[in-house]
Image (cartoon, rainbow, N blue to C red):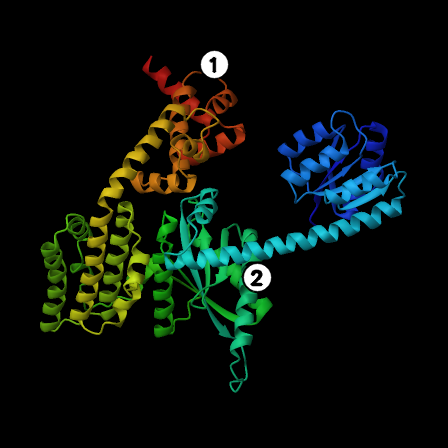
Amino acid sequence: MHMYKLLIVEDEKAIAQGIAKSNPWEEWGFQVVGICDNGEEAVAFIERDRPDLVLSDIRMPKMDGIALMQYLNAQYPEIKIVILSGYNDFEYLQMAIRNHVAEYLLKPTLLEEFEELFHKMKNVLDEEAQQREKQEIQTKTREFNALLKGYGYSEEFVEAFFYHRDTDSYRVVQLCVQENVEDKNTVYDRERHYQKKQSVVQVMNRHVQDCGMDSFFLCNYEDYITGILCVDESMNEQEIEDGIVEMMEMAERETGLLLHCAVSAVCEDYRMLPQCYEQTKYCIGQKLLLDTDKKIVWYRRTKDEWIGDYFDYFGIGFDEKNILKNILNQDMEQLEKELLGVFDAFRRAAQQGDSSDIHYINRICMEVLFSVSREIYRCNVHPEKLMSEHDYHYMDVFDKPTLEGKQEFLMGVFELFMQECKAQKETVSKTGELARKVKRIVDEEYMSNLISLEYVAEKVHKNPTYISKVFKNEFDCKFSSYVTDRRLEKSKELLEDPLVKVYEIAEMLGWADVSNFIKVFKKKFGISPDEYRKVVSGASDNRR
């Protein structure tokens, strides 16, 4: 059962202790997190550890219950207030009502009155929590739908979501759903099928953390069940697969559906998730086409699994660096030659009797689109949005039946990229200077515990979300990762001094919690700070 945090504010210590210890709060769904003597102490406590409900006396020194009510109403209107007073005063009751006090109790209060009131308050808090969760799911679904398209999402929301994830490793998971029915004559019910898919989404989201993962599943704009997976870099593919299979089996048991799954390649920038989504669509299409019994299809493995023995797949391919270079240099002639050379190689292979597998051709066309799209983000170009505005989509290359059609499609997309890169060139120059300014601030102040995205954004008079995006574009590194790397490199230097304790180093470098410093250090370098110190000390002794 979820426990709500309760703060008791009462200047008479005996009464406060009696309230805290004589009532079965946990049975009622509450945990007493603090006792304060007056309103001033309560305000300080609330700033540190925000409770869900405040039970407060009215008559108190320094800051009374009325002033505390007014403060909470202005600053934290979501916190519920219950007034407990020995003063049966109509004026106080009116004041309490005006300040949105939830309930008003008179001393002495019977246990039954406490129980009835706090059961009621728990029901109110439960309903509000459910409503917030519903709104949060709706917001995530809307924003991640837009993110999978590549445009139309709130950068501030998405940046905040991924900024607080302790990883730069993302994948997209797509579920393929089949009805598990014995009767072949059962009529397909679209609404019923949709509701079952929603049930799968709920089950996956309910169990995802139990399986050691951080992700969010939704029924997306194309009616596919899709998950955005934030994966710890230490997890290998088998561990990821085991976790996904476990979740799917739970969903199958609860919904009666048969589930298969496609998993994209890994990406290190959430803006690449639209490409990961296209990869899963490709995998699902291949699974249906080939009727494979595999529970999970990995995009990375499809190249090896679906090639034949009769065609040299790796002998023909695009030079992605040259294509990108031509786009950035605005060299249309060389770009056309680059594409023509690859497609002419396929034509010659076909004329000589080699069987050019259409799946491979489609695959490398899509791969070159992905690769170039990833790179031009640094030029402040949003490829998915740009392509959509001109009615281009990655998977459209599959629908072109001829080599000429595929070549024209790629050329059309790359020409759009070229035009947009040219338009953004001046903007990129300005944002590059801003990114370098942010970097200089970090380099000077990274040891301060004040350093944060919000702190730096305020110094340069820009929005934190904008700063995060500009920094990432310029240096291909998250702001938080850069700060952490600077601190970790400095910590290695400080660890060479045996007189400086590990917790002192953590404090000097802005870590409030030494255990977090140790965890981050070990994740980065593979050994703990103490182990590193021993290695450095041993190397120093050997030199002597």
The residue mark sitting in front, 2 or 1, is 2
Residue placed furthest toward the bottom:
185
Q: Where does residue 444 sit, x and y in percent of width and height?
A: 37, 23
Q: Is residue 371 above or below residue 360?
A: above
Mark 1, secondary structure of its residue: loop
- Asked whether disc 2 touches disc 1, contact meaning CB atoms under 8 Å apart, the reply is no
Residue at the top extreme, as displayed: 544
Query: Residue at the spot x=16%, y=59% of the render?
Result: 315
Badge 2 amino acid: Val
Disc 1 crowd rating (10 Å Cα; few below 14, some 14-19, many 20+) is few
Residue at 53 percent across and 28 percent down: it is 512
Q: How many marks?
A: 2
Horizontally, residue 13 falls left or right of residue 475, namely: right
Q: Is residue 377 above or below residue 390?
A: above
**For numbered disc 2, what is the local secondary structure?**
helix
- N-terminal of the two: label 2 or label 1? 2
Q: Is residue 51 left or right of residue 503?
A: right
Q: Give the residue pinned by disc 2.
A: 203
**Residue picked out by circle 1:** 499
Q: Which residue type does callout 1 highlight?
A: Leu
Taking depth in this image into account, of 23 and 266 the one nearest to the observer is 23
Task: Say if residue 59 shows up in the picture.
Answer: yes
Q: Which mark is residue 105?
A: none
Relative side of 253 to 424, left or right: right
In front of the other: 388 or 271:
388
Image quarter where the C terminus lies is top left
Crowding at dot 2, Cα within 10 Å, few <14 / some 14-19 / many 20+, comes out as some
Q: Quadrant of residue 492?
A: top left
Q: Measured from the top left, where is residue 302 in percent x and y?
A: 32, 62
